[in-house]
């Protein structure tokens, strides 16, 4: 099922026309009618948000489809704040080729977190959230997999995003140009500790 | 029905609080823009860290992914400058429905472009900016237009308040479905993760954390009900502001914490008290 944007635009203009007509005959009845429309529109909007954000997804596929069409992405929200409570400490280590060898391992995320703690207002929050969210997505996508070493290329999209961010980070922080090899080590330690070692990566 | 009609059309409610709310919202946007400029290299330059996806769904949805789909450094800079200009227009009390709609669209595009860096506060900000378009603090000579503006103003006001109540209720409900929140260990667990903590929070004893966990759930559950009763407001807002300051400064989710505090302004109802006092003095 695909929603037709022309219908949306047509409906918008019909509503606009009705509103103009209403303006001309603004009396008590018109006000009541207008109140009805506004109350229904607001109720509909809030109910749709409630349905969209509710922890238990609605079962009816038609309602679910309409709900998603209406909400996403313009009214998208998520109120599952810290649910489940994060119980895993994730780390993002990186090292790159230098002088026929590798540099020491560096924990990129921790470095950004420390910077953010020094001044909460400096906006480093965005960099922390960026790396932290991408790391969470990457580790979640490997949830079924045991700890492992990736020697060849990566086909996993979440890992590719993380790889892109680390490459850009390296380029901007260490002014690295040209093709330079690097390695990534991502770990999660908590109830279930895991590590994934990504070798033979290169900055393009 | 008559009561609702009277509520919508009688007078513009809480104009003073709406004015404060608007100013706070615009100042917050200026802070956000400052962050964008300060972090321009990481977020908007050619070497940005943001992995952007082109998204084509339909005309309406594409409009809020315009920056994503046509990104260039120039366009990114243009969006940022446009937000600054419209925000300043707002702070100078010269904003209109059109400027606020444009502001909403610009911010929606910027937030969608920076999707991996968002928190629940950014999505809430989008909703606040949408409702903000319907606030009007000035009167016009045309009675009908005035009536309509009053109705939209009051609807937006109640809309934001209900949205905040809904957010608190949903947040509490989510927590009640999760074991770590039910058994009281959630905050202690969260405070041990360096990304969401600092030395002070990490050192809070687990018993204290348990009390805070249950207080948080109780606060979020009771907010949608108690906020409508004046005697409870001082306690609710005191706890709420403290909680959101801890989130902002302690846990590091600064923007989320501040935007939630800004929302409280609309629950102050200073004008209503003034109205009541006027009525009493007239009698």
Image (spheres, helix red, strand yellow):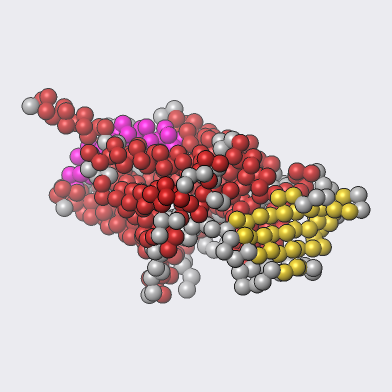
Is residue A34 rendered to the left or right of residue B262? Answer: left
Q: Position of residue B191 (x, y in %)?
A: 51, 49
Question: Which residue is more in the foreground, B18 or A161?
Answer: A161
Q: In this view, does B227 lie above or below A18?
A: above
Q: In this view, does B131 lie above or below B279?
A: below
Q: Which residue is drawn at 25% across and 32% down?
A: B271
Question: Which residue is more in the foreground, B247 or B273?
Answer: B247
Q: Residue at x 44, y 60 (%)?
A: B180
What's the magenta region? B5-26
Q: Where is residue A46 in the image (x, y as percent from the top left)?
A: 34, 56
- Residue closest to the far top: B281
How many callouts does the rendering have?
0
Q: In this view, does A13 lie above or below A62?
A: above
Q: Residue at x 16, y 32 (%)?
A: B276
Question: Which residue is more in the foreground, B103 or A170?
Answer: A170
**Quadrant location of the C terminus of chain A in the rendered image:** bottom right
Q: Is residue B7 rendered magenta in the image?
A: yes
Q: Where is residue A2 in the image (x, y as percent from the top left)?
A: 48, 70
Q: Where is residue B161 in the image (x, y as percent from the top left)?
A: 32, 46
Q: Is residue B122 rendered magenta in the image?
A: no
State the predominant SS element of the stretch in magenta.
Answer: helix
- Inspect this view and state whether residue A76 appears: no
Q: Residue at x 51, y 52 (%)?
A: B190
Is residue B283 rendered to the left or right of residue B96? Answer: left
The quadrant in which residue B178 appears is: bottom left
- Residue closest to the far right: A100
- Residue closest to the far left: B283
Is residue B122 rendered to the left or right of residue B75? Answer: left
- Inspect this view and state whether residue B58 appears: yes
């Amino acid at each position: 099922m695909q929603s037709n944007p022309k219908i949306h635009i047509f409906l918008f203009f019909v509503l606009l026309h009705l509103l103009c007509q209403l303006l001309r005959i603004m009396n008590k009845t018109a006000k009541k009618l207008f109140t009805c429309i506004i109350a229904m529109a607001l109720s509909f909007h809030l109910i749709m948000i409630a349905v969209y954000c509710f922890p238990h997804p609605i079962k009816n596929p038609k309602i679910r489809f309409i709900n998603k069409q209406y909400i996403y992405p313009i009214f998208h929200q998520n109120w599952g704040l810290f649910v489940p409570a994060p119980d895993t400490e994730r780390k993002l280590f990186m090292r790159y080729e230098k002088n026929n060898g590798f540099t020491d391992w560096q924990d990129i995320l921790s470095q950004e977190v420390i910077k953010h703690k020094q001044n909460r207002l400096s906006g480093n929050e965005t960099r922390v959230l960026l790396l932290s969210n991408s790391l969470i997505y990457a580790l979640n996508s490997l949830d079924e997999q045991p700890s492992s070493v990736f020697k060849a290329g990566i086909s996993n999209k979440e890992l590719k995003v993380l790889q892109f961010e680390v490459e850009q980070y390296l380029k901007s922080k260490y002014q690295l140009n040209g093709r330079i090899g690097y390695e990534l080590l991502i770990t999660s330690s908590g109830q279930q500790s895991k590590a994934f070692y990504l070798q033979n990566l290169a900055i393009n | 029905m008559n009561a609702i009609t009277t509520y919508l059309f009688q007078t513009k409610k809480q104009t003073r609080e709406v004015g404060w709310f608007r100013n706070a919202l615009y100042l917050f946007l200026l802070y956000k823009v400052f962050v964008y400029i300060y972090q321009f290299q990481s977020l908007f330059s050619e070497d940005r860290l943001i992995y952007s996806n082109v998204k084509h769904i339909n005309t309406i949805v594409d409009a809020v992914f315009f920056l994503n789909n046509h990104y260039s450094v120039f366009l990114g800079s243009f969006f940022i400058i446009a937000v600054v200009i419209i925000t300043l227009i707002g702070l100078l009390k010269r904003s209109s429905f059109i400027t606020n709609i444009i502001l909403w669209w610009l911010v929606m595009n910027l937030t969608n472009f920076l999707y991996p860096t968002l928190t629940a506060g950014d999505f809430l900000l989008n909703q606040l900016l949408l409702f903000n378009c319907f606030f009007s603090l000035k009167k016009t000579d045309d009675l009908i237009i005035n009536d309509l503006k009053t109705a939209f103003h009051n609807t937006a006001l109640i809309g934001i308040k209900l949205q905040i109540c809904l957010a608190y209720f949903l947040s509490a409900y989510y927590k009640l479905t999760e074991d770590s929140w039910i058994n009281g260990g959630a905050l202690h667990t969260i405070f041990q993760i360096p990304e969401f903590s600092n030395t002070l929070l990490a050192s809070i004893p687990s018993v204290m954390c348990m009390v805070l966990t249950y207080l948080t759930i109780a606060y979020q559950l009771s907010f949608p009900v108690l906020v409508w009763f004046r005697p409870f407001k001082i306690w609710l807002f005191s706890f709420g502001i403290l909680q959101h300051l801890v989130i902002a400064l302690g846990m590091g989710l600064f923007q989320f914490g501040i935007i939630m505090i800004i929302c409280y302004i609309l629950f102050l109802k200073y004008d209503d008290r003034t109205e009541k006092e006027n009525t009493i003095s007239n009698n």
